[in-house]
Image (cartoon, rainbow, N blue to C red):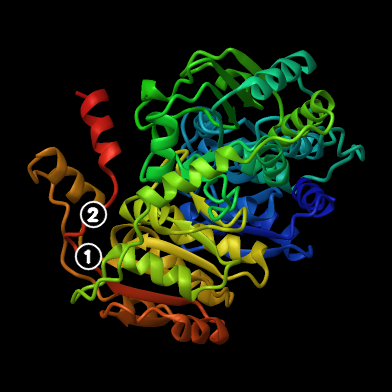
Amino acid sequence: MNAAEVIVRSLEKHGVTCVFGVPGGAIESLNTALYKSSITVIVAKHEEGAAFMADGYARVSGAIAVCCSTAGPGATNMITGIASAFGDSIPVIALTGQVSTSLFGKGAIQEFSVQSFGIVSIFRQITKYSDIIINENKAGEMISRARRLALTGRKGPVHLNLPADIMKRKVTDDSHERCSTTQVLGFDREAVKEAAQLLLAAKRPVIVAGWGTVLSRADKELLELAELLDIPVATSPKAKGILSELHPLSLGVLGFAGSPVAKEYILKRDVDVLLAVGTSFNEFVTSGWDKRLLPMKSLIHVDIDCNEIGKNYYVHVGIAGDAATVLRELVFEIGRIRKGRRIENARRKEVEQIRAALLVKTRKQNKPLYSPQRLIMDLNEALPKNALYFADNGNSMAWAIRYLTITEPYSFYVGLGFASMGFAVAAPIGAKLAAGDRPVVALVGDGSFLMNGMEVATAVNYNIPVIWVIMNNAMLGMVYHGRKLAGIPEGIPSGFKPVDHVKLAEGLGARGIRITTPGEINRELMDDILAAGVPTVLDVIIDPEEVPPIHSRISSLEKLYT
């Protein structure tokens, strides 16, 4: 076997079933090795799209995903997608081509920087590990190390640069793989005991579940702890739905575009003990690090990355560990101390009272144009409960966070770690390959769709039936409304000429449907789309003047950036 074949064999051995990428001369050896393998290759229209697709596949499957590109601009085109994966701790392997080592420093086509190591340095800033394979006998060891680092501890993307001549060389050392995957699932026993005592003694405790609970697949442990002590649960925007939003203890999303119930219970009442699990307390979940989030007595912070603990708020008990493991141990410790004593359901009754007072059901207004909130509500009613939603950055994300009701964990995804527009245009294609029969729906603005919309053609090429719902108002809506709320003039225009996304979709080979009247999105339409099983674009003309729930973000900008 040559080095490229060793890499592909390693990927096959560890369960990789598809690779997303764009071909090119510098990775022809990788191409040949993939041709001989059982791995399916999904050719994207742009390398950023390929990286987003790998990200989407990894988010939904919980497994590692792979994307590839040729040298030079192929590699740099992937940077935003890999940076997004890094921001959200998504395990993606990025393989990039490189000119032959004999040409380093000569100015070969698509050679990058001094002695061609520049691209490795760039990727080191946005990955857990980035290196170049300069010896064919190291190929197996390095791909194995990359995979182990991607999946160990706080997960994240890794990068290997593949010189063309090295990839062609025969491997003489047959001990290709020397690194297995090892997950550290330890925890601080004494800290768990202290946290358990604080939670048992608390009068008004609350749990804030972050993205780490999703990455850890900790929904069962979170539910068990919440019900054991009757503790209300709020989530970060990225963890939306990790606890059913119809559960009596659910406060909904805390922070950006979040639930008024979460804001009332946590920020306006005297919470004495707050258990934060898998959240970094970033700007979005804290509405700009609101000091009212601090509990009256104790903050317990659980995170797999000890660098996140106490980063933004003073912590009384810090527990470094995997979310599911620590929650499981908390349940065990609390059960040992309580010995079967019951906890009254007074807290869930308080949550119900707050919900009844604050959440007035939004009327389905019969305006000439679709209001975004009604659009989200109609989708929620028309689609199966097991649908997967990807919301793009911008107003589409704000409307989705506020008005979608997620009842099954691992059903809602936003790329907020790097907050890149266009993420939810491409990522759902990879997600659908991992989701099986579950419907996958992309909620995107027209500005985001215009960035990566050509990837609809990728879905068409491979008959991947994603549904894109475009909120078409001919503008960058968050910029437009943010400026209006903040009193900022339109120096760099946020609007543009309307685009007919139906014609665009049909030109790319997909089904396109124009939606102009409120109520057109209904169970009958969505059943028809799902039954057809083809990539479909819904071009929904929305009311451009409907103000999204972004007020906390505007307040943060005025407070923190002026």
Residue 316 seen anywhere in this rendered image of the structure: yes
Q: Quadrant location of the C terminus?
A: top left
For the point 84% across and 33% down, the residue is 179
Q: Amino acid at mark 2?
A: Gly
What numbered label is drawn on residue 477?
2
Residue identifier under label 1: 473
Q: Amino acid at mark 1?
A: Asn
Q: Secondary structure at mark 2?
A: helix
Q: Secondary structure at mark 1?
A: loop
Inter-mark Cα distance, 1 to 2: 8 Å
In the rendered view, would you say 556 is above or below 37? above
Q: Are marks 1 and 2 in contact (CB under 8 Å)?
A: yes
Q: Position of residue 354 (x, y in %)?
A: 42, 44
For the point 92% across and 40% down, the residue is 174
Question: Taking 304 as reference, is 290 left or right?
Answer: left
Residue 89 seen anywhere in this rendered image of the structure: no
